[in-house]
Image: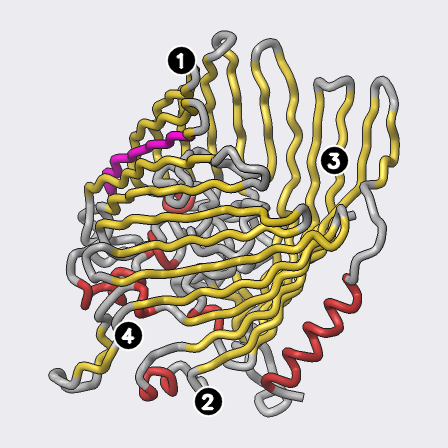
Amino acid sequence: MRGPRRIIVLYGLLIGALWPHTGRAVPIKEGDRWTINLDGALKGYGLAMHMAYPWTAVAAMGWSSRSALMGLGDARLKFTGSYKDRVKWKVHLRTVGLISSQPGATQGLSGGVGALAEPARSLPMQYTDSDDPSVIWKSEVDRLAVKIRIWKLDVTIGRQAIGFGVGFVWQPADLLGTFSPLEVDREFKPGLDALRIDWALGQFTSLTLVGVAGGPPCRHVQVPTPSSPLTPSKWSTPDGKTCSPGRPSFDPNHSALAMRLRTTVGNFDLGALIGYIRGDIVAGLFAAGAIGRWKLRAEATLTHDLDANDLDGPYWSPVNDFVRAVVGFNYAFHTKKSLSILAEFYYNGFGTWDRTAYLRRATLARVAEFAEVSNLGMIYAATGLQWQPADRLSTTFLAMANLRDPSVHLSLTAEFNLTDNSSLAVGGFLPIGKSPNLDFTGSLPELKSRSEFGLYPTMIFTEYKRYF
């Protein structure tokens, strides 16, 4: 069974297995000293996408048409607990599988589904099999951390999620395990192998120290087949180096050491960040607060590339020093049903004014490997709306615009709460902009971008979640 039929059957079986029924977290032990819980989440996605690329470029990707279907299943089992509220632990075991009707279809998502993204990790607690370009399977320990309270310090060691950004749509300071603004599901940030220390300096002031140990992802990219039984099994990093998934790895260009100071003044949180992030020195400021029904956010980072002279290195980029900054607001209306709007402006100093250079910029490590930067241009604006017209129905609309192209990306999602612990969402992405074309001026045809969001696919999706 191949192509669309295979996707439909897989997704149908997944929905059938996950159809809602009463469920809740299971308390394994509850007492004055010990608390141990078991719960989890099951998710299923069905996606259909269409690429507005010239046929020659689509055929070069190995596709038989400009459209693709995908089915994705995501299962997460969570163990959490504590001892006297001084020691807490968190363990998440996760497995994800994706099957698509076209080879390498995830390359066309442009950040649409981040479930398969791999952050830089040092410990060998993950396995990704991607030798078949139409099938990707990943199993991992996504959380394995212990948090200990010592005096005024909260010390967390192990695989954990780390977030520093405060923006609504874009978060320049969120450099570790970053989400794209176009993620369908943003519930769980990927875990990193880290040591984190939170020090309470006062009632409203804290200092956070974070050290992250990382290495390049190691994927299974080649296996023997019946037609080629002598083909050796091969594991490789994104830059093509041979690796072993069972060995710890460490690379300064995949690791980080950062410090953040945060304090509260009135209704606002103010803070500063400085650190070494994957071969860069990064400094930043942020502010977040509320005035009545207005929520206000702003943050900015300055990045200095320490490897600027390594012209042949895999992490080289043409931009060595740059600023990224956002400012925005969210306003909640005083209505019977929940209704709020947001607006945000974003300056991306790592981007380019040249719209024909977007595809080259997209191949750089900050975008393609680390997902540190998800946009390719310089000046952006976004506006959004969240509305809950009924108790079990909520809708979200977001429009992002590259003001230089110009091009626009529209997304709309409606989520239905089927039960207290399950939901079904349907939505779609609609890019508006000039699609890429082929340039025949050179010796070989070259794909040229003409707008940023013209590179993105039109997509519709369904998403089912159930928690237990």
Q: Residue at x 16, y 61 (%)?
A: 354
Q: CA distance from mark 3 to mark 2?
A: 46 Å
Kindly identify which residue carries mark 3. Answer: 80
Q: Are marks 2 and 4 in contact (CB under 8 Å)?
A: no
Question: Disc 2 or 4, which lies upstream in sequence?
Answer: 2
Residue 329 seen in render: yes
Please, which residue is most extreme toward the left here? 441
Q: Which mark is residue 64?
A: 2
Label 3 neighbourhood size at 10 Å, few (<14), some (14-19), many (20+)?
Answer: some
Question: Is tag 4's residue or tag 1's residue first in the polypeptide sequence?
Answer: 1
Residue occupying the point 24% across, 71% down: 449
Q: Quick one: label 3 or label 1, which is nearer the N terminus? A: 3
The amino acid sitting under disc 4 is Ser
Which residue is disc 1 drawn over?
A: 265
Say which residue appears at 71% left-offset and 51% top-offset. Answer: 41
Tell me the distance, in whole angstroms, between the alpha carbons under discs 3 and 4.
47 Å
Which of the two marks, 3 or 1, is nearer to us in this view?
Answer: 1
Look at discs 3 and 2 and give the one toward the viewer: 2
Would residue 329 appear left or right of 94 to someone viewing this image?
left
Choose mark 2 or mark 1, whichever is in front.
1
CA separation, marks 2 and 1? 58 Å
Magenta span: chief secondary structure: strand
Q: Which residues are magenta?
A: 295-306
Q: Amino acid at mark 1?
A: Val
Rendered location of residue 229, percent (x, y):
61, 86
- The colour scheme is secondary structure
Q: Residue furthest bottom?
A: 227
Between disc 2 and disc 4, the foreground one is 4
User: Is any part of residue 190 visible from this angle?
Assistant: no
Mark 4, residue position: 435
Question: Residue 268's spot in the image, x, y percent?
Answer: 41, 20
Q: Residue at x 47, y 35 (%)?
A: 332
